[in-house]
Image: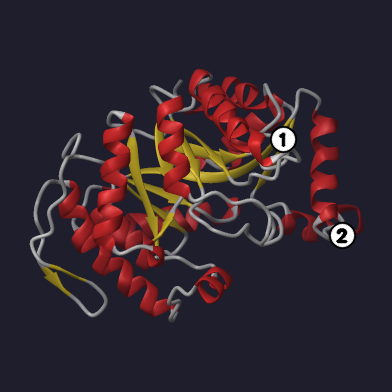
Amino acid sequence: MSIRLGYQIPNFSYGGPVADLFPTVIAQAREAESSGFDTVFVMDHFYQLPGLGQPDEPMLESYTALAGLATATSTIQLSALVTGNTYRNPTMLAKTVTTLDVVSGGRAVLGIGAGWFELEHQQLGYEFGTFTDRFARLGEALEIIAPMLRGDRPTYEGKWYRADGAINEPRFRDDLPILLGGSGERKTFGFAARYADHLNIICNADELPRKMAALADRCEESGRDRGTLETSYLASVILDEDGDRARRLQREYLGVRGVDLDAMSASERAAATARQFVGSPDEVAEQLRTRVLDHGIDGLVINMAVNGHTPGVVELAGRTLRPLVGG
């Protein structure tokens, strides 16, 4: 398993009827598959996230959507970025992602994190708890899920979860990859060092040197060779053949969300756009190379909330970015 170039679909607000929604998702996944991306991701949320839209904007349940994409694609890996651990019992999650692996012919990746969006928990009846609670639950869940993915039958009794000889059949393989996603230098990175094949780092680009140093420390503490844990960075990309048009799209997108870049100081603009990479193909490629990949990150996962659903845009991104990550 390798994730060098991933495409995350973060929104389903395409402006058309619901009947056209999933065909648009399929079109993006197929375009990603044919243009050099190795993995397609959806978010595991039930409401749209702050910064992307309003809670009542369209949001598909992740594993149902991924199963649909499995039948519409043939080679690209499929994953949630990332599964919220709080939303599913760990034995059910192991069964769900293993079923996706069977349905897709061995293309599933388990992306998992502790969960964080409080509004979903409150309104939908999921226990939220404290930050410490959620990471304790994630640690317990991984003690159950990881062996189930390998064909073992774990027995576990924890504060949050239990299993008694949990069976997980059928499996397509015994090495279904685990991806941890997040920014936590102690807990998330520590779990990644212990359990994961891949770590997707979510942070401002200027924080990457510190994040990479912390990851090296967690691997050393766990007795793991840092080189055996693949990394990627989650980037928001606004790409157009015309760089000025891309920057106009950025201003329009942020303006609707109450962010006026033109009214900000240079430092405020930098903070507001710290995870965005905007411009022409050459400009975006240079930004990602210097701001991300030069810090030792192995791969890129991009989302294109502004115009990724426009035919041809994902293909342009693949053609632009694949050479940066060894394609």
Residue sticking out furthest to the right: 263
Q: Is residue 105 above or below residue 216?
A: above
Q: Position of residue 153 (x, y in %)?
A: 9, 56
x 68%, y 54%: residue: 57
* Rendering coords of residue 264 (x, y %): 87, 59
* Residue on which disc 2 sits: 264
**Quadrant hosting residue 175:** top left
> Which amino acid type is marked by label 2?
Met
The residue depicted at 59 percent of the width and 19 percent of the height is 319
- Taking depth in this image into account, of 251 and 15 the one nearest to the observer is 15
Q: Is residue 170 above or below residue 147?
A: above
Dot label at residue 173: none
- Residue picked out by circle 1: 307
**Which color mode does the image show?**
secondary structure
Judging depth in this view, the residue of 128 and 263 nearest the camera is 128
| Above or below for 51 versus 319 | below
Cα separation, mark 1 vs mark 2, equals: 24 Å
Q: Answer few, some or many: residues within 10 Å of disc 2's Cα (few below 14, many 20 plus, some between 14 and 19).
A: few
* Amino acid type, mark 1: Asn
Q: Mark 1: give few (<14), some (14-19) or many (20+) Cα within 10 Å.
A: some
x, y (%) of residue 163? Answer: 15, 67
For residue 1, say whether it is visible.
no
Between 270 and 77, the residue placed more toward the observer is: 77
In which image quadrant can residue 9 be found? top right
Which of the image's four quarters has the N terminus? top left
Residue 199 can be seen in this image = yes
